[in-house]
């Protein structure tokens, strides 16, 4: 349709076998990430020697109404780059993408990114953030970055706080959230998402201060989830859009970093597009 761009992906048989459906899905998601627009399959055709048509099949896409709302490509795609350099870079990223695909829940993160990006501002970040949190959890688990305490360490801790814990239990027993506080104190081995994010960003050598745009975007997820967003004025709508675009940019940058990319990334948090080096914050 005129409201959508079309693209054909061609797979050729080198060894007598074509790539599996799982591989094709992975490649389509990689390509969607690079061009910044969710590619949705609408059909497949098979050819023999000399492009003699064997079979063809059309299908309903995942999204019933396909409409292109604009790209959120993570890297510059302008013409004029050295073609050989660009192709080698994309091939390297795809190779790393296949290695990391299942290990860090890339598919889940990207699907939530595309779904959330189609939603109105003010409701989009909880969806986008849920995918990002899946990636963070998978990465921490894969790299064993959260400390696992031994039985002895837990026993030593219990003995250390025993007297204070008994005293505190009596003092706050009548408070509404007293039990919650005591349980947290008694079992401090579970990490909240904020703590996990801190460990995750530290492992990637990414640092954001309290006033950084990235940090504001991460906090806005909770605001949208628990308090709602007021979009009554143009100024408020602009600020919410800026925060949302910053969150999307952050996810793009994180995935690129995990894929060992070290060139420029696209910053969508400013009016007009600008390119930043991978070690530059928004």
Image (cartoon, rainbow, N blue to C red):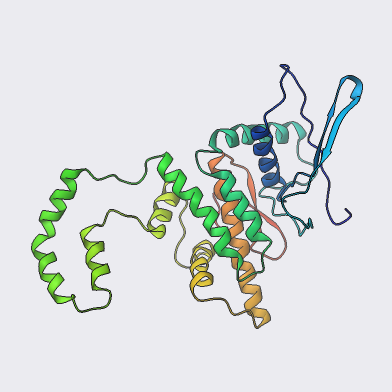
Q: Position of residue 89 (x, y in %)?
A: 66, 35
Q: Residue at x 59, y 34 (%)?
A: 98
Q: Position of residue 253 (x, y in %)?
A: 58, 50
Above or below residue 174? Residue 163 is above
Q: Tell how many labels.
A: 0
Left or right of 8 on screen, residue 249: left
Left or right of 29 on screen, residue 222: left
Front in this rendered view, residue 1 or 232: 1
Q: Residue at x 64, y 49 (%)?
A: 265
Q: Taking the image as drawn, is residue 282 in sight?
A: no
Q: Taking the image as drawn, is residue 213 in sight?
A: yes
Q: Residue at x 73, y 54 (%)?
A: 63
Front in this rendered view, residue 14 or 274: 14
Left or right of 37 on screen, residue 229: left
Q: Quadrant of residue 150?
A: top left
Q: Quadrant of residue 96?
A: top right
Above or below residue 135? Residue 70 is below
Above or below residue 59? Residue 88 is above
Q: Position of residue 180 (x, y in %)?
A: 27, 68
Q: Residue at x 76, y 58 (%)?
A: 70
Residue pushed farthest left? 163
Query: Which quadrant is home to the C terminus?
Result: bottom right
């Amino acid at each position: 349709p005129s409201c959508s761009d079309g693209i054909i992906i061609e797979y050729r048989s080198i060894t007598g076998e074509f790539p599996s459906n799982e591989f094709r899905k992975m490649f389509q998601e990689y390509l969607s990430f690079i061009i910044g627009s969710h590619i949705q399959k609408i059909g497949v055709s098979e050819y023999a020697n000399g492009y003699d048509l064997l079979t063809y099949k059309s299908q309903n896409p995942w999204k019933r109404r396909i409409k292109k709302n604009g790209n959120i490509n993570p890297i510059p795609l302008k013409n004029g780059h050295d073609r050989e350099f660009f192709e080698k870079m994309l091939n390297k990223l795809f190779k790393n993408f296949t290695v990391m695909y299942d290990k860090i829940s890339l598919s889940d993160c990207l699907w939530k990114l595309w779904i959330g990006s189609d939603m109105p501002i003010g409701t989009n970040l909880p969806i986008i953030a849920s995918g990002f949190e899946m990636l963070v959890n998978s990465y921490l688990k894969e790299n064993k970055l959260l400390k696992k305490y031994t039985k002895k360490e837990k026993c030593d801790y219990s003995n250390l706080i025993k007297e204070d814990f008994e005293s505190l239990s009596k003092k706050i027993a009548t408070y509404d959230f007293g039990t919650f506080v005591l349980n947290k104190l008694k079992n401090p081995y579970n990490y909240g998402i904020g703590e996990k994010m801190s460990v995750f960003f530290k492992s990637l050598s990414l640092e954001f201060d309290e006033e950084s745009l990235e940090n504001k975007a991460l906090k806005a997820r909770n605001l949208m989830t628990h308090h709602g967003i007021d979009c009554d004025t143009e100024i408020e709508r602009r600020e919410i859009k800026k925060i949302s675009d910053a969150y999307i940019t952050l996810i793009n940058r994180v995935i690129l970093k995990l894929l060992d990319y070290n060139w420029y990334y696209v910053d969508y948090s400013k009016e007009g597009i600008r390119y930043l080096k991978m070690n530059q914050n928004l």
